Image: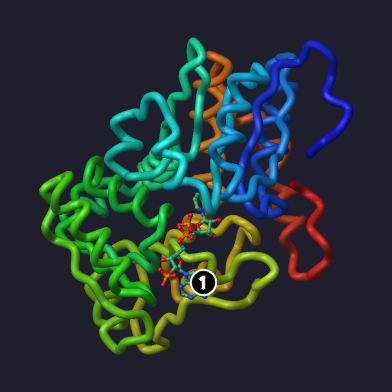
Amino acid sequence: MRKNIKTHAKLVGIIGHPIVHSWSPIIHETAFKFTKQNYEYAAFDVLPKYLRDALKGLTALGIVGCNVTVPHKEAVLEFLDEVSADARLVGAVNTIYVENEMLVGHNTDVDGVVEALKPFREQISNQSVTLFGAGGGARAVVYSLISYFRPEQIYVINRDTSRAELLKKFFADSQNYRNIKINELHNLNEAEAIKKSKLVVNATPVGMFPGVGESIMIDDTVDLEGKIFFDLVYNPVHTAFLKTARKKNAIIVSGLEMLYYQAAKAFELWTGVAMPLEKVRAKLDQKFIDASAPKERKVSVQ
Ligand code: NAP
């Protein structure tokens, strides 16, 4: 955990395990400076066996709230007093706000996905989508797509098809959405799914630092011109998946977009103040791109 917390500062933070890859602290710290608020953002590495105790500690220590990341996003649900409708329908929480000693769970990843894809709403609605992954991030993507973009069909491609089947059942039961088709990763149907799709999303950690250069395979023969490629991975900002897509004239959306927008919503929940996103981006965009340059130097932005 960070040391030298300013006296009288209000505290927010992030819980996950491991936690070193996160860029959330620098985004929030920058926004606190711009809005002149006396808050600190701390990173807590919490083992799964201590999750319940860590959450109890939020109220006990007067912590305003926290972000939740892998592997706790689904597990925290049972320890919360209230859960927002979005988080309940996604089945995962990425932000907790302590309100009158009650732990309230939200899913601002949904805001992140919706805002990142908003410029393409017209293009996506009533079209097909290919989604790699079936974890917490993928669930936020599916929920956002169903609720705000109404795609005709979603092809979910995952290594573990039973996990993808659970996701399919979850959204059939909770949202009455029955247009999810499951494929196993590295099956020839992938290329077919991408060919039919307007939007292709990577919601796996493949390509994330330190695995820079790895990519969910994109069949060389598929024409990607005009398709939209969205990678949830944000470190590096320009992943191998996005670079391949850009070379083939696809439109690309980096995970950094989603990261900023989910952070902005969490910031607002905790402080009641809007995050000055333009200013934060002007300060950090280049820093993040530099930090993810392919020199493989140790990334110190956390
Ligand atoms: P998660 O719940 O652990 O799910 C991971 C998913 O990726 C699973 O479907 C898993 O497949 C698949 N996967 C993992 N390793 C793989 C590999 N080597 N090859 C193929 N598939 C693999 O994680 P998550 O929370 O969804 O996060 C996924 C990624 O999204 C992470 O990189 C995370 O940082 C990023 N993310 C970004 C934002 C943002 O704001 N930009 C927000 C949320 C998440 P199996 O089921 O087969 O294991």
Residue 251 seen in render = no
Q: Quadrant of residue 280?
A: top right
Residue 163's spot in the image, x, y percent?
32, 66
- Picture coordinates of residue 128 (x, y %)? 21, 63
Which of the pair 15/194 is nearer the observer?
Answer: 15
Front residue of 226/283: it is 283
Determine whether 6 is above or below 41 in the image.
above
Specify the quadrant of the image occupied by residue 88.
top left
Q: Position of residue 3 (x, y in %)?
A: 86, 32
Residue 75 is left or right of residue 240, and the answer is left
Q: Residue at x 45, y 46 (%)?
A: 75
Count of labels shown? 1
Three-letter amino acid code at the position of disc 1:
Phe
From the viewer's perspective, is 259 left or right of 279? left
* Residue of label 1: 241
Q: Is residue 206 above or below residue 68?
A: below
Instruction: Tell me the element at label 1.
Output: helix
Relative to 97, is 223 above or below? below
Q: Residue at x 40, y 45 (%)?
A: 113
